[in-house]
Image: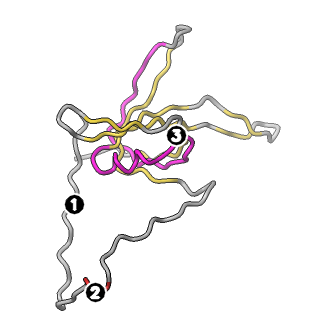
């Protein structure tokens, strides 16, 4: 099966919104804006029209994304990408990209981040029987409704 994937960086235009579907599935809605900034012929920076992307994160990823805040710069690995056309109040056409996230991470291009302490058992809880542990199963991806 062929799948189109896209990775992009942008800033959260609003705080994430964690909601639940009728079936109880968690989904976090993110509004990401990417500002196109380029140098003009005079060498000065110019801001282009911003592009907004509506991102949905599902399951455990949704819970983690809900901890993000407006203004955070994120990198989104996206799938199921669709344009959503609309008419603005002035009658001009517009569009928003919609997608589901495979992964969302904080960008460290402009700021740093601190890792949380690892959640590992105490040394007394570790035992080794000489065999490698079984690999963990891959998480199942929820289909967007």
First in sequence: mark 1 or mark 2?
2
The residue pinned by badge 3 equals: 12
Q: Quadrant of residue 108?
A: bottom right
Q: Secondary structure at mark 3?
A: strand
The residue pinned by badge 1 equals: 138
Q: Quadrant of residue 90?
A: top right
In the figure, 73 relative to 87: above or below? below
The residue pinned by badge 2 equals: 124
Callout 1 crowding tier (Cα within 10 Å): few <14, some 14–19, many ≥20 = few
Q: Which residues are magenta?
A: 58-87
Q: Describe residue 143's horizontal placement relative to residue 113 as left or right.
A: left
Residue for point 54% across, 12% down: 92
Report if residue 78 lies within the magenta region: yes
Q: How is the image coloured?
A: secondary structure
First in sequence: mark 3 or mark 2?
3
Q: Secondary structure at mark 2?
A: helix
Callout 3 crowding tier (Cα within 10 Å): few <14, some 14–19, many ≥20 = many
Across and down, in percent, residue 54 comes to 42, 33
Mark 1 to mark 2: distance in Å? 29 Å
In the figure, 120 relative to 90: above or below? below
Residue for point 56% across, 38% down: 34
Q: Nearer the viewer, mark 1 or mark 2?
A: 2
Q: Of residues 5 and 84, which is closer to you in this image?
A: 84
In the figure, 16 relative to 59: above or below? above
First in sequence: mark 3 or mark 1?
3
Residue for point 22% across, 47% down: 1
**Residue 28's disc number:** none
Q: Residue furthest right?
A: 42
């Amino acid at each position: 099966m062929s799948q189109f994937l896209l990775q992009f960086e942008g800033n959260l235009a609003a705080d994430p919104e964690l909601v639940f579907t009728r079936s109880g599935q968690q989904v976090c809605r993110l509004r990401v804006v990417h500002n196109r900034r380029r140098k003009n012929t005079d060498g000065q920076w110019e801001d282009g029209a911003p592009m907004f992307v509506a991102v949905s994160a599902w399951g455990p990823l949704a819970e983690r994304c809900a901890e993000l805040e407006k203004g955070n710069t994120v990198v989104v690995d996206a799938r199921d990408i669709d344009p959503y056309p609309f008419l603005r109040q002035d009658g001009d056409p517009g569009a928003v990209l919609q997608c589901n996230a495979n992964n969302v991470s904080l960008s460290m291009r402009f700021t740093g981040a601190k890792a949380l302490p690892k959640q590992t058992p105490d040394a007394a809880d570790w035992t080794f029987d000489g065999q490698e542990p079984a690999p963990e199963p891959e998480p199942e991806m929820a289909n967007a409704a």
